[in-house]
Amino acid sequence: MMAGEDDDSFLEAMSDVVPLKREPRVAARGRGADKRDSSLQHRRAAAVAANDRDRNILSRDGIEPLDPWYVLDFKRPGIQNGVFRKLRQGRYEAEARLDLHRMTAAIARRELFEFVQESHQFGLRSVLVIHGKGESTAERERSSILKGCVDQWLRELEIVQAFHSAQPRHGGTGAIYVLLRKSQEKKRENRERFMKGRVPYDAV
């Protein structure tokens, strides 16, 4: 049989064969790429979250609990006695408040750090933090832990100028007044307000 006849016979025998269906390879590679892209996004998100956590300088360990009825009292050098007295007496209106009730120490650490940072960015000067005193024994134990943490953490933040346990009408020893350093934006606003309408010395 000639070679040409072999080819004709082969084609005739294969005329009713249907090719197998399969997914194109490009699509298969695309699915793998999606998984890799998704994995990369998760790693990037985790890295961002880690950087955010790294910004939090507050202590994690070695903090002693404090009695829920203990009065907290702190002011940095340079804070005028009159200013601290007004803070202690609750005469500064709380411009924002944070309630740490029933939070774990880990969650409270994050919430307090972000609260103080954001309050300062918004130009707030006086805020209230509620850590609780606890009605039941279990609540009292948690409150004493949170109170010790708050006392330690606020001292570690340079933008905190002073703090004192609140007056009974604002939560007593279960809450704390916090005085924050004036933000640069607020300083600029006050300087502009002070200078507005004043006559320059050279013009007199």
Image (cartoon, grey):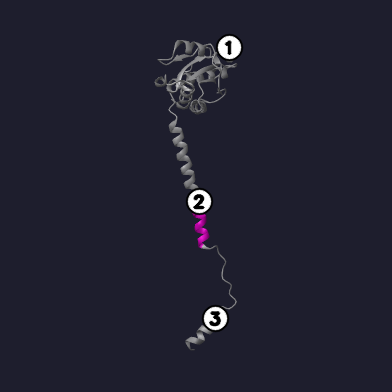
Q: Is residue 37 left or right of residue 139?
A: left
Position of 136 relative to 58 (above/below): above
> Disc 3, disc 1: CB below 8 Å?
no
Q: Nearer the viewer, residue 18 or 75?
A: 75
Q: Mark 3, mark 2: which one is toward the viewer? A: 2
Q: Magenta region, mostly helix, strand or loop?
A: helix
Q: Mark 3, mark 1: which one is toward the viewer? A: 1
Q: Which residues are magenta?
A: 25-37
Q: Mark 1, mark 2: which one is toward the viewer? A: 1
Look at label 3 and name its amino acid.
Leu
Q: Reading the chain from its start, which is encountered first: label 3 or label 2?
A: 3
- Please rate how many residues cluster around mark 3, counting C-alpha atoms within 10 Å: few if below 14, some from 14 to 19, many from 20: few
Q: Nearer the viewer, residue 26 or 72?
A: 72
Look at label 2 and name its amino acid.
Lys
Numbered disc 1: secondary structure: helix
User: Which residue is disc 1 drawn over?
Assistant: 168
User: Which residue is disc 3 drawn over?
Assistant: 11
Position of 76 relative to 58 (above/below): above
Residue 189 pos. (x, y %)? 48, 25
> Disc 3, disc 2: CB below 8 Å?
no
Q: Is residue 151 magenta?
A: no
Disc 3 from disc 2: Cα separation: 43 Å
* Residue beneath the point at 58% across and 12% down: 168
Residue 141 pos. (x, y %)? 53, 18
User: Which residue is disc 2 drawn over?
Assistant: 35
**Quarter occupied by the C terminus:** top left
* Residue beneath the point at 45% across and 36% down: 50
- Please rate how many residues cluster around mark 1, counting C-alpha atoms within 10 Å: few if below 14, some from 14 to 19, many from 20: few
Tell which residue pokes out farthest to the bottom in this image.
Answer: 1
Q: Is residue 169 left or right of residue 120?
A: right
Look at label 1 and name its amino acid.
Pro
